[in-house]
Image: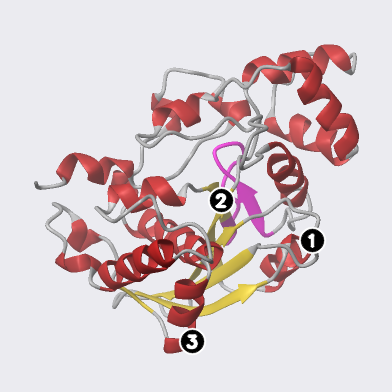
Amino acid sequence: MSEIFVAGADFSGAKTIPNDTWLAVGHLTSVGLEITSLTHVGAHKLAHELNETKFLVAVGLDFPFSLPFEFLNYMAEQIRRGPFEEWEEVAETLAFMTFDQFLTLTQDFKLEPKRTADKAVTKPALSPLHRGNPSMVQMTFHGIRMLTSLNPKQFFVIPFQNQIPFGCAVMETYPRETLFSLGLPDTGYKGKDSDKSLETRKEIIKQLSKIRNKKIAGIEKCPQISWGKFTEKQMTENDHALDAVISCYSTAIWQTAKEFFKDPYASDDANVLVEGWIYSPSLLQTSLQK
């Protein structure tokens, strides 16, 4: 198990280059998860960095991988094609569409329905079509397009695609749900200029470093996490950097203890095979000891 790496990214759809997309990579061993790098890559370089990272077995990305079924039906009608039956059809359509075209479709649709996955988590998840603050429309569009630029011989996107030999699983993560599942503060840590958010990030980092001490049944199955001083400084100063590490840790838990993750195929909703699924260790919540 010495050469197993997992990764996590907090993705931004902002036009700024580089925008606030951060990538965390960790070495996963029987001892635990060591964060080996935390980089401000920007969305424009994320696919390249992932394609170039060796020994990756799983990566968690914090953005919606697809769109609500109601909107997909609407989009299919508007572009005069049959219903979307596979996620690959959705991704390919967005890959050949401009953002302005997509934005017009979302504005004309007007509604902001949630996916089955958005409603399956404990902490409220925004619709991928949410146009308020934060806007999810731009992030969703550019995130899905980014997925199409990953090496298909190296990566498979779950739950849509089948596992490939020696490949790397790509999953949608939700840092807030992961924090809640681990009994950590899941609100109030966003923002760089607030003393309160800074103190909350410090508290999250402190508790995360001692996560195995939490009174949660099954926590011993989750890897202990460690990092260097510079990485801790980055997480303390930037909430996007912290979210990238949380996504990486959530991915590490999935790699070592899949029983804490809800099964998309058990949702009794075939739409998840086109809408996608959120992978967070939500089943740890039922073990929280008050």
Cα separation between marks 3 and 1: 25 Å
Residue at the bottom extreme, as displayed? 229
Q: Who's the residue at 75% across and 51% down the image? A: 146
x and y, in percent, of residue 3 in the image: 48, 78
Cα separation between marks 2 and 1: 18 Å
Q: How crowded is mark 2: few (under 14 residues within 10 Å), some or many (20 or more)?
A: many
Q: Which of marks 2 and 1 is nearer the N terminus?
A: 1
Q: Which of marks 3 and 1 is in front?
A: 1
Left or right relative to 230: residue 93: right
User: Would you name the residue on which mark 1 appears?
Assistant: 16
Question: Range of the magenta residues?
Answer: 154-168
The image's mark for residue 230 is 3
Q: Who's the residue at 47% across and 47% down the image? A: 174
Confirm or deny contact between disc 2 and disc 3 (CB under 8 A). Answer: no
Q: Who's the residue at 86% across and 14% down the image? A: 78
In the picture shown, does residue 275 fall above or below 14?
above
Residue closest to the eye, 90 or 131: 131
Circle 1 SS class: loop
Q: Main secondary structure of the magenta part?
A: loop
Please state, as top left, top right, bottom left or bottom right, where the N terminus lies in the image.
bottom left
Circle 2 SS class: strand
- Any magenta on residue 68? no
User: Would you name the residue on which mark 2 appears?
Assistant: 62
